[in-house]
């Protein structure tokens, strides 16, 4: 996420900055290897290995169930860490039908790279104040060029300036971002771009908690100074639209990386549908979650799927928690599912067409 400018960019030590940003993160290609033999053997192991094998089998069940619509739910920084092309392949091959994610995953990571920018391996981590003087932002052992991130902020601002001054759901605005990448993007394998092309809706229920927030605030402030109306994001529309999709979808499955707001948002559609009078709405039939969060503090990020059943959100017949760092296990799960090929028989939902 972009930060307040504290240094004159003209004073940056470009040589030192280039040294630190010399190693691009390379996103894993799930088609280049077949994880089925590994997952098959993990099923006969114990601990997290067996949990992962069962989670993978549940995802394959979702893909094989012709009535099941699948939602990819993303929190955390796996996109920046090397899983960006993995998620793109799931979408391209009709292995997911909708996405709920943090704004950072969609804007600061995927859209950011769609504009031609990169994430970098932090093979050396100096004092973070030195990084700040170089305009380098750090996500654990991954770097982002702050100046490139500010370009991302400005692009969001420019997109907002082209739109009619009215309320937009995050889905509607992200669709405009996808349209922008089709016309001006520099990366074919962008999740935002592919979602636009395949009519797969993306929701970010806390959208402004990302680089989008900076651009949208500037849009509103500048328009207000000019005495002109401005666009706004409608969080209630997010909830309504995603609930409409849940009602239409019927049988649903959740592939969740991390937790937090995206996890709770997709689960709450069941309760919302009931409140709207859809008494026959089904709980999410399938669910798996990959997380390292501790369950003992009662936080939403770590609440188990069994706990969600008490709220009427998730069935417990086909659910699995996997307590592991997602970047280390998602490539195995996704490669296994890709090579088993159940996606080849799935009907395309194109839920994005529901909203014109």
Image: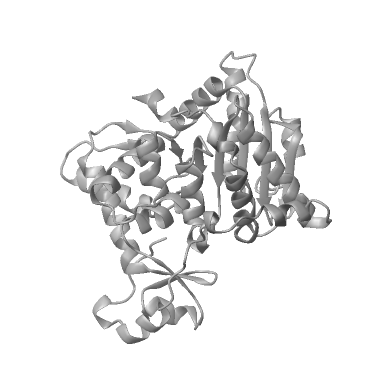
**Count of picture labels:** 0
Residue 238 position in % (x across, y down): 45, 32
Q: Quadrant of the N terminus?
A: bottom left
Residue 5 position in % (x across, y down): 32, 69
Q: Residue at x 47, y 55 (%)?
A: 85
- Which residue occupies the extreme left position in the image? 226
Image vertical order of residue 169 relative to residue 40, above or below: above
Image vertical order of residue 258 relative to residue 353, above or below: below
Which color scheme does this rendered protein use?
one colour
Frontmost residue, 184 versus 223? 184
Q: Residue at x 55, y 50 (%)?
A: 75
- Using the rendered image of the protein, determine whether residue 199 is visible from the camera's viewpoint: yes
Image vertical order of residue 269 relative to residue 277, above or below: below
Q: Residue at x 53, y 36 (%)?
A: 344
Q: Residue at x 36, y 50 (%)?
A: 212
**In this picture, residue 6 sits left or right of residue 40:** left
Q: Quadrant of residue 304?
A: top right
Image vertical order of residue 351 relative to residue 112, above or below: above
- Using the rendered image of the protein, determine whether residue 323 is visible from the camera's viewpoint: no
Q: Quadrant of the C terminus?
A: top left
Residue 132 position in % (x across, y down): 40, 76
Residue 190 position in % (x across, y down): 39, 51
**In this picture, residue 49 sits left or right of residue 142:** right
Q: Quadrant of residue 266?
A: top right
């Amino acid at each position: 996420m972009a930060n307040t400018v504290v240094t004159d960019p003209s004073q940056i030590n470009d040589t030192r900055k280039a040294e630190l940003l010399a190693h691009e993160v390379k996103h894993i290609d799930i088609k280049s290897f077949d994880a089925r033999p590994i997952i098959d053997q993990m099923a006969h192991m114990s601990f997290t290995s067996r949990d992962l094998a069962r989670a993978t089998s549940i995802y394959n069940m979702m893909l094989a169930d012709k009535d099941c619509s699948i939602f990819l739910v993303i929190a955390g920084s796996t996109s920046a860490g090397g899983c960006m092309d993995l998620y793109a392949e799931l979408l391209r091959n009709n292995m997911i039908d909708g996405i709920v994610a943090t704004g950072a995953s969609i804007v600061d990571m995927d859209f950011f790279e769609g504009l031609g920018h990169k994430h970098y391996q932090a093979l050396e981590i100096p004092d973070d104040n030195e990084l700040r003087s170089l305009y380098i932002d750090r996500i654990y052992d991954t770097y982002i060029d702050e100046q490139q991130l500010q370009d991302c902020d400005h692009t969001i601002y420019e997109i907002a300036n082209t739109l009619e001054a009215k309320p937009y759901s995050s889905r509607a605005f992200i669709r405009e971002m996808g349209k922008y990448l089709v016309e001006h993007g520099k990366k074919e394998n962008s999740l935002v771009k592919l979602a636009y092309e395949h009519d797969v809706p993306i929701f970010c229920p806390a959208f402004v908690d990302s680089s989008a927030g900076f651009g949208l605030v500037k849009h509103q402030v500048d328009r207000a100074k000019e005495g002109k109306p401005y666009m706004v994001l409608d969080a209630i529309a997010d909830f309504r639209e995603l609930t409409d999709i849940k009602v239409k979808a019927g049988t649903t499955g959740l592939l969740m990386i991390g937790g937090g707001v995206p996890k709770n948002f997709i689960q709450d559609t069941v309760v919302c549908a009931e409140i709207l009078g859809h008494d026959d709405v089904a709980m999410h039939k399938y669910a798996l979650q990959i997380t390292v969060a501790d369950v003992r503090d009662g936080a939403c990020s770590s609440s188990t799927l069994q706990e969600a059943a008490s709220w009427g959100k998730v069935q417990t017949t086909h659910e699995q928690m996997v307590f592991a760092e997602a970047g280390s296990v998602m490539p195995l799960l996704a490669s296994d599912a890709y090579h088993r090929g159940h996606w080849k028989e799935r009907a395309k939902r194109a839920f994005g067409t529901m909203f014109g």
